[in-house]
Image (spheres, grey):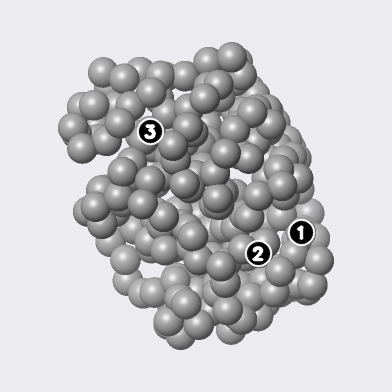
Amino acid sequence: MDSVIVIGGTGETGRRVVGRLVREGRVVRVLTRDAQRAREVLGHDVQLVEGDVREPASIAGITHGMQGLICAVGTRRHFSANGTQQVEAGGVRHLMGELAKSVGHVVLLSGYGLDRNSLFLRGFSWVLNGYYEAKEAAEQAVRSAGVPYTIVRPVTLSNRPATGHAVLNQSGAVGMLSTMSRDVLADVLVRSLGDPSAFGKTFELTEGVAEPLGTQLRTMKQDGLRRMPSHTPMFGVQARA
């Protein structure tokens, strides 16, 4: 896909996604609430459009002319007006309701832990104002939008350089305290975009030793066919499944 709009493009992951897309020579548009700051962060090789995912009227038409959409929007202010429910859930619903049918593929950055049965993870979600409930609402909005989609659920992210390769997982055991490089995540988000073997699939993402990404994408099961994870250790990562 030669033209891509990135939501959350000034964040730690989003700016890495934008950088990769620009280096590949794609037309990149970024939704931002502050165009001046975004220009300072992202440079002059991207299109900027001001808007706020919490306000549907402000984002009408922003995908016009774009072939793909990568959504890396997020918030760390879980209980404010810019909090988890407003941005993670409501914002993505607004995006999908207003915009998704005008693009050919949506790639959503979600979160590790959904579909996993863990008291620790449920407690984590409660402390962060229903973090997993908001992520689930965002995922459902994407699945219901009527366009091809891919949903990526990375483990805890780090700004460190990559020490391994992308490891895709659906039902295997993945440690709750696993971490991975944002560089690896950004690469997966970009390389999944427009790849038919990624369509309709949701998978977790870790970092380690693995087969090539394209091979892994082809072996992932589509939603409705994938098996749910059955074991969630505190440490360690088992083979992908």
For residue 189, above or below residue 78: below
Name the mark nearer the viewer: 3 or 1.
Answer: 3
3 or 1: tag closer to the N-terminus: 3
For residue 35, above or below residue 235: above
Is residue 120 found left or right of 102 in the rendered image?
right
Check disc 1 and report its element: helix, strand or loop.
loop
Which dot marks residue 201?
2
Residue at 21% x, 37% y: name it.
Answer: 45
Pick the front one: 49 or 159: 49
* Residue 238 appears in the figure: no
The amino acid beneath tag 2 is: Lys
Q: CA distance from mark 1 to mark 2?
A: 14 Å
The amino acid beneath tag 3 is: Val
Residue at 75% x, 64% y: name it.
Answer: 223
Q: Which quarter of the image is occupied by the N terminus?
A: bottom left
Q: For the residue carrying disc 3, how many other residues have a C-alpha within 10 Å: few (<14), some (14-19), or many (20+)?
A: many
Q: CA distance from mark 3 to mark 2?
A: 25 Å
Check disc 2 and report its element: helix, strand or loop.
strand
Check disc 3 and report its element: helix, strand or loop.
strand
Residue at 35% x, 18% y: name it.
Answer: 34
Residues at discs 1 and 2 in contact (Cβ within 8 Å): no
3 or 2: tag closer to the N-terminus: 3
Name the mark nearer the viewer: 1 or 2.
Answer: 2
For residue 59, above or below residue 146: above
Q: For the residue carrying disc 1, how many other residues have a C-alpha within 10 Å: few (<14), some (14-19), or many (20+)?
A: some
1 or 2: tag closer to the N-terminus: 1
Which dot marks residue 30?
3
| Residue wearing tag 1 | 115
Pick the front one: 53 or 145: 145
* Residue 60 appears in the figure: yes
The amino acid beneath tag 1 is: Asp
